[in-house]
Image (cartoon, rainbow, N blue to C red):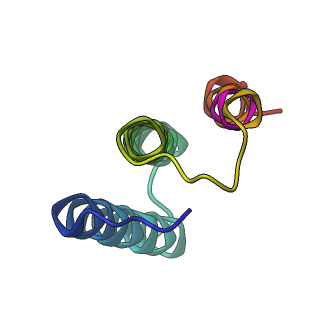
Amino acid sequence: MRIQNETTKQALIARLRRIEGQVAGIQRMIEEERSCHEILQQLSAVRAALYSTSVELVRAYATQCVQDPSGDIPPEEMIENIITALSRVSRKAD
């Protein structure tokens, strides 16, 4: 699937750029030998931001599949693809 909605695409890119900035900030924190507590707090924020971004991508995927179903994929397979995407987002990190 490609993201066809330009607004959604730009919103996802903006979120990922923010996350990229957060990760760079965490790298600086480690270099500056900041406290583990502060670093872990920022890592938690990045994880939450990635999760939210994943949810938005799954939402866009599901919406696009429902609103503009491709004749190439049978409905049962489309549903299975959406469920697989949801399970990836909801899976706890190891």
> Hey, which residue is sitting farthest left in the picture?
7
In the picture, measured across the screen, residue 36 lies left or right of residue 73, that is: left
Query: Does residue 81 show up magenta in the picture?
Result: yes
> In the rendered structure, does residue 41 fall within the stretch colored magenta?
no
Residue depicted at 24% across the width and 58% down the height: 8
Identity of the residue furthest to the front in this view:
71
Q: Quadrant of the C terminus?
A: top right
Please say if 86 is above or below 2.
Answer: above
Q: Residue at x 45, y 63 (%)?
A: 26
Q: Please state the horizontal and vertical placement of residue 92, each as a whole percent of the image.
A: 72, 25
The residue stretch that appears in magenta: 78-82
Examine the residues drawn in magenta and state their main secondary structure: helix
Between 76 and 18, the residue placed more toward the observer is 76
Of all residues, the one furthest to the right in this rendering is 94
x and y percentages locating residue 69 in the rendered image: 49, 46
Residue at the (66%, 27%) spot, across then down: 79
Give me the residue at 61% from left, 52% from top.
71
- The picture places residue 59, in percent across and down from the top left corner, at 40, 36
Q: Nearer the viewer, residue 24 or 77?
A: 77
Quadrant position of residue 20: bottom left
The answer to whether 34 appears left or right of 77 in the picture is left
Q: Position of residue 48 (x, y in %)?
A: 43, 36
Q: Quadrant of the N terminus?
A: bottom right
